[in-house]
């Protein structure tokens, strides 16, 4: 019995390591997609578009590990919550990878046009979204509710920047019809970054549930959707 318990705990540790690896891939892809847009680096755009395979492979592997742990060990209480949280976090991270691809696709279209304006707030959104993702995963590893709650609070700044970007780009579009198409792509990028923040928020909410068994979804500003 002791050996079974030890094996189960070892498997949980491996599961956590694989989730962290996937989180690292996802965060790096967000960083590269925003950097490619900001620096107008077409080669980096293409690298992001071509590099989705590691995240997709990890997504399948992690789900498989979770389902085997559930089937073979039938965990209860905190262990069960940990595996359910891992399944959900895995899905959120895979979607973050998809959103990085969406940003790269918008960047590829944007590079066909002259710059609309110097990009300041979009890189700032990228930094906030990456930090939220990193903090949410750190909170998961450390079972740190306070850090998870800080991720929920950071989502407001991301939402405010998205609204600011929309208002500013709308002004450019009204002044010059040639800027409508590229400005729309920048608006799309800001929406994708907001969604990445939403997925980080989902992970933070899962951490709070994992540690305290408290469901904070749909509690006003504590939930960002997605």
Image (cartoon, rainbow, N blue to C red):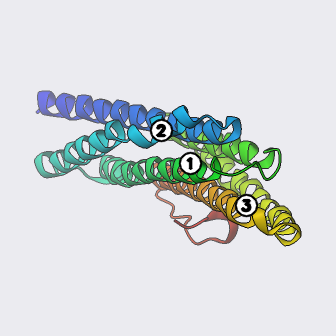
Image position, residue 79 (x, y; %): 31, 46
In three-dimensional space, the C-alpha distance between marks 2 and 3, rounded to whole angstroms, equals: 21 Å
Mark 3 lies on residue: 183
In the picture, the disc for residue 65 is none
In three-dimensional space, the C-alpha distance between marks 2 and 1, rounded to whole angstroms, equals: 8 Å
Image position, residue 208 (x, y; %): 53, 52
Residue 139 falls in image quadrant: top right
For residue 103, side relative to residue 85 (left or right):
right
Quadrant containing the N terminus is top left
Residue, x 50% and y 51% (percent of image)?
Answer: 203
Image position, residue 88 (x, y; %): 38, 55
Mark 2 lies on residue: 46
Between discs 2 and 1, the one toward the N terminus = 2
Image position, residue 127 (x, y; %): 69, 40
Contact (CB < 8 A) between labels 2 and 1?
yes
Residue, x 52% and y 55% (percent of image)?
Answer: 199
Between discs 2 and 3, the one toward the N terminus = 2
Name the secondary structure under disc 3.
helix
Residue 143 visible to an observer of this rendering: no
Residue, x 15% and y 46% (percent of image)?
Answer: 68
Contact (CB < 8 A) between labels 2 and 3?
no
In the picture, the disc for residue 108 is 1
Residue 161 falls in image quadrant: bottom right
Name the secondary structure under disc 1.
helix
Q: Tell which of 132 and 51 is nearer to you.
A: 51
């Amino acid at each position: 019995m002791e050996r079974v318990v030890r094996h189960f705990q070892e498997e949980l540790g491996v599961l956590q390591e694989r989730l962290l690896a996937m989180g690292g891939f996802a965060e790096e892809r967000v960083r590269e997609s925003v950097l490619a847009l900001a620096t107008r680096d077409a080669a980096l755009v293409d690298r992001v578009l071509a590099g989705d395979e590691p995240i997709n492979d990890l997504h399948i592997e992690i789900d498989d590990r979770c389902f085997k742990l559930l089937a073979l060990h039938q965990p209860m209480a905190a262990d069960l919550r940990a595996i359910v949280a891992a399944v959900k976090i895995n899905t959120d991270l895979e979607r973050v990878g998809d959103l990085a691809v969406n940003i790269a696709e918008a960047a590829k279209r944007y590079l066909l046009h002259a710059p609309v304006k110097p990009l300041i707030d979009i890189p700032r959104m990228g930094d906030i979204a990456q930090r939220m993702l990193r903090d949410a995963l750190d909170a998961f590893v450390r079972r740190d509710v306070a850090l998870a709650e800080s991720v929920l609070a950071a989502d407001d700044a991301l939402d405010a920047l998205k609204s600011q970007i929309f208002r500013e780009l709308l002004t450019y579009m009204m002044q010059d019809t040639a800027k409508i198409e590229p400005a729309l792509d920048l608006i799309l990028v800001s929406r994708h970054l907001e969604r990445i923040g939403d997925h980080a928020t989902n992970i933070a909410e899962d951490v709070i549930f994992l540690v305290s068994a408290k469901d904070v979804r749909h509690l006003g500003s504590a939930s960002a959707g997605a």
